Amino acid sequence: MSGKFYITTPIYYANSAPHIGHAYSSVVADSLARYHRLLGEDVFFLSGTDEHGAKVNRSAEEKGEEVRVFVDKNSKRFEELNRVLQISNDDFIRTTDQKKHWLGVYKIWEKIKEAGDIYMGTYKGFYCLGCESFITDKDLKNGKCAYHDVEPEVIEEENYFFRLSKYSDTLQKIIKEDQFKITPVARKNETLSFIENGLEDISFSRPTKDIKWGIPVPGNPEHTIYVWSDALTNYISALGYGRDEKLFNKFWPADVHVIAKDILRFHTVIWPAMLLSAGLPLPKEFLVHGFINVDGQKMSKTIGNVIDPFKVTEDYGADALRYFFLRELSLFEDGDYTEEKFKSAYNANLANGLGNYVSRIFKMAFSYFDGKIKKPTDILLSSVPFREKERESFSVPYVFEHVFWPEYEKNMDEIKISAAADGVWGIISDLDTYIQNYEPFKLIKTDQEKTAAVLWSLFAGLADISWMIYPFMPETAEKIIKALGVEKREKKWGDFSLKSIETLFKRKE
Ligand code: MSP
């Protein structure tokens, strides 16, 4: 059944240029968006930038730049990164976009207020700028924010509060019953224990005299809407909530919100509570991935180990970075990026592995058959079975259709992206074995027909692979698809009339 699929990335703070951590979330989300398009679903994929709040404002000041110019510049870098990495987002939301975003924020504020969940109060306590969050003693380690290792600000101010505590029991029940999924389960448990420790009402505004850079509270411009309340609403404002709700009605609720562990609570506690209060349906799943460290350390400007995704892409190509993210890192754990690991995975699996396989079989096809590989008869095909020993009479396409695609789809449906990719590289290595078994480069001297059948099988295998890697490495997939002339994903492949193909991945020394 082909339905709709709405997937989002976090919206990234427009206070600096993107690093590979941001690229990671976008690539993960993109692979799922592309996969669901492959299934024929109606996909809406959203990304964007989070541009308000004290943190962004302060960064602009530190740079001595006018904040609007500053966020324009940074937001553009995120959009550029999306193009460079072939992120197929359908829209890019900016929280400074008054026409698009602000109306949605106003509307949800009003709804929450109508529900009686917004009231005026005094907040006295800590604020961590890094988190853009009011924090408590529990969040401190030696007097510093445990996450950012920075002393929080102490503030006392009049704020509008959101009655978060009211939703404690409802949220617990909903999460326990998996009414929305939090993947992996460890993050579900983390959310539950956070709620069990007691939810307090939270500040939902800051005084405008201190925080000017944001959206004014409707009806009371002396207060600015809290940046997280503003930011989370992007997921519905982009769909037209509060202005033209056609897309909203079609795509909401979100099927998957991709986030990382650092913004778990905001997403799995505050956001659902806001939606409950406003009487809106809840998202179906939160996909919470781990963090990328660099050489075993947290990426930070102070350490100076921030990896620039533009640079990696320039050196290796977008698909190489995408490949590394999706296959070589484990989605739900913290992963480590090292240049050495990256290069060795690139050489082993892209330059060799896939790249070598493609160049080998194209070379044979052109030198033996001028690039024209006719589909052999069933009899001929069964004379060159794919896995001779295990399955006497199975030819390549038969096996693929019945074994590999279902396994691939099962993995992708369960968001086991690296397992799906492992499957693909498993096929590549099986196909290499197939070449070794039949030695077409020798067979051609004695039996042209049988060689053609072997080659056809190798290309049918590649045709499936090209579509399987499309969500992971779209540029490479498209090159192969074009050279094979298989512009539509078919269940069965016919004759191949090949076009030449360039080297996909040059070996790096
Ligand atoms: N603006 C908020 C999110 C609002 S969403 C309504 C924010 N922005 S951020 O720029 O700090 O980006 C946070 C997200 O970027 C993380 O949740 C994660 O998805 C991604 N990553 C940032 N650094 C990362 C790593 N080092 N590793 C992996 N992902 C990381 O928080």
Image (cartoon, rainbow, N blue to C red):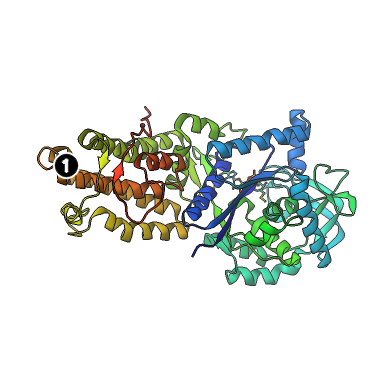
Q: Quadrant of residue 49?
A: top right
The vertical placement of 115 against 245, above or below, is: below
- Residue 17 makes an appearance in the image: no
Nearer to the camera, 8 or 309: 8
Of 199 and 20, the residue lying toward us: 20
Q: Is residue 404 above or below residue 277?
A: above
Q: How many marks?
A: 1
Q: Secondary structure at mark 1?
A: loop
Tell me residue 366's x, y (percent).
25, 34
Nearer to us in this view, 229 or 262: 229
Residue ID at (69%, 58%): 246
Residue at the farthest left position: 446
* Vertical position of residue 152 compared to residue 286: above or below: above
Q: Is residue 106 left or right of residue 467?
A: right
User: Which quarter of the figure is the C terminus placed in?
Assistant: top left
Question: Which residue is pictured at 87% across the width and 59% down the height?
Answer: 121
Residue 53 on image: x %, y %: 76, 44
Q: Residue at x 63, y 70 (%)?
A: 174
On the image, numbered disc 1 is attached to which residue? 439
Q: Quadrant of residue 360?
A: top left
Please provide percent x and percent y for residue 24. 53, 44
Decide if residue 474 is on the left or right side of residue 367: right
Residue 183 visible in the shown view: yes
Up/down of 445 relative to 228, above or below: above
